[in-house]
Image (cartoon, grey):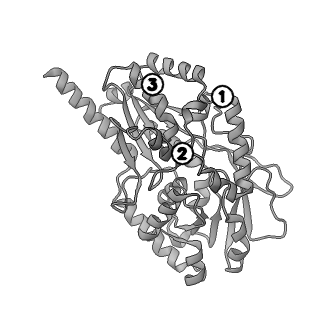
Amino acid sequence: MSMSMHQSMKVTILCSGFGLGFYTPGLLMQAGLRRLGVETAIHVFENVLPESARLKVDKSRKAYHDNFAVALMSQKVPQDMRNSLDLAAMEVLLTRWMEEDRQHFICLSGHWMYVLEEYRKRREPGSVHVDIVYMDSTPSPSWKNLAKHNPHFADGCGETTFFENDPNRVSHYIDVPAVEHVPFEARKSRLFVHGGGWGMGTYREKVGRLEEAGWELDLLLYDQDQPDEQRNGIRYFRMDPQWRTWQRNEAGEHTFPPFGEVKIGEETLYEAGPDYHGMLDQACHVQAIVSKPGGGSLTDSFATATPLIMLEPFGVHEMHNADLWERLGLGIRYDTWMQIYGGSAEILEDMHQRIVELRSQTPRYVESYVRNIQVQASSTGLEKGS
């Protein structure tokens, strides 16, 4: 693609802070597009909600971390997000998109589709290109709820499912070239244990059993969780508890979660990397990630060639993610790994190799996306010239 084409292109990536799996992949895409010289903007859905709704998200975050059963129940409550929107904030955003002539959108959350529908009504038919990216192998709650209210929400949009249940494959992946590619034999006998962006699930209950099986651990703490002084084989990390997905930094940019190592008696220094989230620096040096099988964890697993040991899923969509990762031989359920393999590293090396091999045959999403836009633009140009 010519440089002038790149410079005239603007891509708007629409994320959600309801889970980091609908946020960090968007920032990874932004980093990839910028490497290709494409101008990008990121918007987080919570910024078109009233402040009261953002406070509610914060409360939910704490409740879901404290009690996984509460989190699982929450998925059964269907929501029509149209009723929650701050219409004045949405109007400001739509006006800005009109002024900036924004035509290309990547949408990671179903919550945004109503806003996009409004925007498309104000533009010439066919002038807005939306690529919907599904971060899970079957629809997560935001897409499921949307389909109930509007079964035709995807009409006229491109659709990409990274992790496909049928035909059982990884269709695309988000490449993170800045992260070290560490061969398995050079990795430490450690596991990275976490509960996704919101610290959900059963990961804390597994720590003792993993230590008994001889593993040293990198454990992600959340909010005010404290390290355990008695445990020498565990290193502790945390995302800055003050940081929120919907905030921007001084430069007006959304950032990766500021991340740091927690040491007893020392102040934690949180840093946000420019190209990827700090968790990947842990993931690429360990032999497996132990977490629930969210789309964000699958993305991290594939980008760093680190197998997933999968804990209890958060809902049906994550259960299907786990099924797919097992079928492809890229991960294993925690109980199976413990009961059949005694928590050993041997099987993990095979999985690591399988990811490396599969990744070498899988198209990179950002490059495919830019190529598609180039094809669209040249075919439009041909039509105009004919």
| Residue 341: % across, % down | 56, 82
- Report helix, strand or loop for mark 1: loop
- Report helix, strand or loop for mark 3: helix
| Residue 375: % across, % down | 25, 36
Compared with residue 170, is residue 160 higher up or lower down, i.e. above or below? Answer: above
Give the class, few, some or many, for how many residues have Cα within 10 Å of label 3's Cα (few <14, many ≥20).
few
Q: CA distance from mark 1 to mark 3?
A: 18 Å
Name the mark on residue 296. Answer: none
Q: Nearer the viewer, mark 1 or mark 2?
A: 1
Q: Amino acid at mark 2?
A: Phe
| Residue 287: % across, % down | 57, 69
Q: Is residue 145 left or right of residue 215?
A: left
Give the class, few, some or many, for how many residues have Cα within 10 Å of label 1's Cα (few <14, many ≥20).
some
Q: Nearer the viewer, residue 212 or 264?
A: 212
Q: CA distance from mark 2 to mark 3?
A: 22 Å
User: Which of the 4 image quarters holds residue 218?
Assistant: bottom right
Q: Amino acid at mark 3?
A: Glu
Q: How many marks?
A: 3
Name the mark on residue 118. Answer: 3
Q: Residue at x 23, y 30 (%)?
A: 378
Q: Amino acid at mark 1?
A: Pro
Where does label 2 land, which residue? 22
Compared with residue 144, is residue 226 higher up or lower down, i.e. above or below? Answer: below
Q: Nearer the viewer, mark 2 or mark 3?
A: 3
- Report helix, strand or loop for mark 2: helix
Q: CA distance from mark 1 to mark 2?
A: 20 Å
Mark toward the start of the polypeptide (2 vs 3): 2
Where does label 1 land, which residue? 50
